[in-house]
Amino acid sequence: MTALPPDFPHDAVMEAATAAADVARSVVLPFFRRGVRADDKADASPVTVADRTAERAIRAVLSERLPGFGLMGEEFGLEAAASPYRWVIDPIDGTRAFITGRPTFGTLIALLHNDVPVLGLIDQPVTGERWIGLRGAPTRYLSALPGHPATRACAQVAAAELSCTAPEILDAPHRPGFDALAAAVRRTSWGGDCYAYGLLALGQIDIIAECTMKIWDWAALVPIVEGAGGRMTDWSGQPLRADGDGTVLAVGDGRLLPRVTALLDTPAA
């Protein structure tokens, strides 16, 4: 695991990330279950005024507090690309859940150093849950709800709980592998977006396998899952990269990884 750089501005980064999440929560909540209109983007994914307003608010906070850092967001692109530090934000991960009134969406805030995620934050505005992961440190879970940030022991695929956001995110080349994995696990559940990764970090889910993921979908999740004792890779077991194939795999127990990646490599019949 890559260590934090020796000059990492720990306090300033943590304060900026939590302040940005607080502002995003205050922006998003007034739109929840208020019938906001959703527009389709070029990739057919939905976006709302809540997404755009929250991203602007997050950018404003982060830029003010750490003006030398780069910024990449799902809705408004990249700023200060040359900086070794780069915030990566998704103001509402799970817009489909948001516009249908389900509290399984979340705000994602990540910080990368030389393209490696070093900090991740998931905030769920409705339930008031927040996960914070910092590379090399235990994940923190801030909530009035029960839960402890530690993945559970599960060495056998046959005993595992598998999760995926939706069948339609599984592109055709990868569907046979997912089906093979789903046939081997104890149970498969659908839905969750980033919230499912928070549940994996609390020991409620054992495996998450998804496709067509962008860097803003997964960057914040890596320090959270790994800080709780899990592993995150692509479907071949390699580290996630911005220019990767879009597959994302999370396992709560690292002993699952070889068998799960072998199943996901199942070719089409």
Image (cartoon, helix red, strand yellow):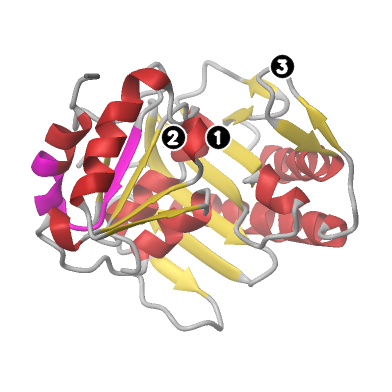
Residue at image position (78%, 26%) is 40
- Nearest the eye: 173 or 192: 173
Which quadrant of the rendered structure holds the C terminus?
Answer: top left
Q: Does the magenta segment cover residue 244?
A: no
Of the numbered discs in the image, which one, if any, rests on residue 42?
Answer: 3
Query: SS class of the residue under badge 2?
Result: strand
- Nearest the eye: 241 or 65: 241
Q: Quarter of the image holding residue 266?
A: top left
Q: Is residue 143 above or below residue 219?
A: below
Which amino acid lies under the numbered mark 3 shown in the image of this protein? Ala
Magenta segment: 248-259
Q: Is residue 191 above or below residue 91?
A: below
Q: Is residue 163 left or right of residue 126?
A: left
Which quadrant of the rendered structure holds the N terminus?
Answer: top left
Q: Is residue 221 above or below residue 81?
A: below
Q: In terms of sequence position, does the residue under pointer 2 or pointer 1 come before the other?
A: 1
Q: Which residue is mark 2?
A: 112
| Rendered location of residue 149, percent (x, y) | 35, 70
| Rendered location of residue 82, percent (x, y) | 52, 16
Q: Which residue is mark 1?
A: 88
Q: Residues within 10 Å of mark 1 (few under 14, many from 20)?
A: many
Q: Residue furthest front?
A: 269
| Rendered location of residue 84, percent (x, y) | 45, 25
Label 2, label 1: how far apart the Cα atoms are: 7 Å
- Marks 2,1: beta carbons within 8 A: yes
Q: Quarter of the image holding residue 33?
A: bottom right
Q: Is residue 191 left or right of residue 208?
A: right
Q: In terms of sequence position, does the residue under pointer 3 or pointer 1 come before the other?
A: 3
Q: In terms of sequence position, does the residue under pointer 3 or pointer 2 come before the other?
A: 3
Q: Quarter of the image holding residue 234?
A: top left
Which amino acid lies under the numbered mark 2 shown in the image of this protein? Leu
Query: SS class of the residue under badge 1?
Result: strand
